[in-house]
Image: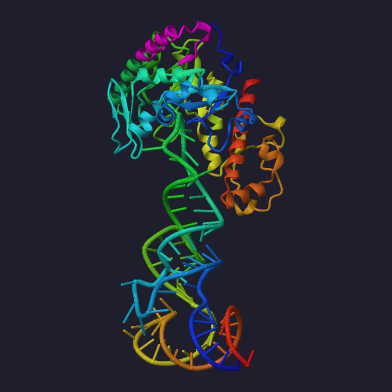
Amino acid sequence: MANPKTFKTKHAGNLPLPVFFPDATRAVLKTLDSVDIENTKTPGVLVNTYHLIKDLGKIILKKHAGVAKFMSWQGGTISDSGGFQVMSIAKQPGSKGKITDEAVTFQVPGQPKVKLTPEDSIAFQMLLDTDMVVVLDDFTPPDASYEYAKETVERTLLWARRSKDEFERICKEKKIAQEDKPYILGVVQGGKYQDLRAYCAQELVKIGFDGAGFGGWPINTSGSFDYESAQTIKDNSPKDYLLYGLGIGKPHEIVALVNMGYHIFDCVLPTRDARHKRLYVYNAKSMDEINVQSPDFYSYFVPDKQKHYSSPQAVSTACDCHLCTNYTASYLAHLFRIGDHTAARLATIHNLRFYSILMEKLRVR
RNA sequence: GCUAGGGUGGUGGAGUGGUCUAACACACGAGACUGUAAAUCUCGCGCCGCAAGGCUUCGGGGGUUCAAAUCCCUCCCCUAGCA
């Protein structure tokens, strides 16, 4: 039982770990197409069960042999279960969403009501034909009481067992060979309560998964990153487990978790920040000088500032992305100021390349 | 030169006697964003001050009034039309 070194994919072979998969929630990475994503040396993307079940539907998917082919994507894919939407939609104050042991119901005004059971989520993810499927989980809110956190853990475990059963049932029904099965990930809830985290992780191991996800909100109520829970999950997982920081995170947080032994990450930050005019830049003059283990290895660069209006420099000389090799910071500032969508595209490309460089640097340790 | 309409903050533009540092918007500045209901949201934006608060503004000058961006006189400037 050795530490995993690669992530097996259907379309891109074995990807060296660790990996960061940005979020193409609705089978598109906002502002980019699949060729753009590939050019940022991004190895894979995450898609979302709740959003695709609502927007895409099973019938369309069946004609396209999986979401990767549908979006003409050559890299790896992971599907999220809809577990995050249990928190971001169903548990929002005023939401008409409902969570029971049987299922979660999402209701966003103006959008179709979606009811999702753990079995539905797995079945749809198998239809998406991704390289890793994730069990539906009951998200522990960051401010949850011990009693409520325990309730979410128990429901998460209940759903995990049902998800695993459904997974095996479908694999058998479709006669999927052992080596062709996608990875299936259990998700650890429990919030800040370490005994609940440990219990949840241990029970998931008994059910039998390929890896464990650090679930819930990774930032505690005082605003700092919850490394303690990450460590507890690591300590209660088998050596050969894939460890996945769900929705994580900022570059220095990823570095810390990779150092801890985590392998897989996804996050909206690089793409959303890019659209919000925040670019990540290495504090280095060239790619070779980047040292991601140093405390302040990166900074934010906000192009839409008067001081950059006439800058003839590239955003970063330590970056080989489409933006940095072809355009000046001044031109990017101009595109943002006039509100042209090309600005968001170029910034997104840049931030994705920042993250792919980060993971490259973390691989050659 | 005559006639008419105008001159308000970094910009566009409200306001036509008191509750005006002056709506709203843009621009500018600061911040947030973590398994995407987010190409979004929050805050600031005359000057001094941490704040309470104080001070100064509506082309220039003068006047009327308890009170003027708002009314009157005059000068300067802009736009359109006519000479």
Q: Is residue A182 magenta?
A: yes
Front position in the image: A50 or A205: A50
What's the residue at 39%, 12% (across, down)? A164
User: Is residue A41 visible in this depiction of the protein?
Assistant: yes
Q: Position of residue A290 (x, y in %)?
A: 67, 31
Q: Position of residue A62 (x, y in %)?
A: 46, 20
From the viewer's perspective, is A322 left or right of A146?
right
Label total for image: 0
Front position in the image: B6 or A154: B6
Q: Is residue A59 magenta?
A: no
Q: Position of residue A186 (x, y in %)?
A: 42, 17
User: Is residue A257 visible in this depiction of the protein?
Assistant: no
Which quadrant of the figure contains the C terminus of chain A? top right
What segment carries the magenta color?
A161-184
From the viewer's perspective, is A44 left or right of B40?
right
Magenta stretch, overall SS: helix
**Colour theme:** rainbow
Task: Determine whether A259 is above or below A299 in the image.
Answer: above
Front position in the image: A301 or A334: A334
Task: Determine whether A342 is above or below A226 in the image.
Answer: below
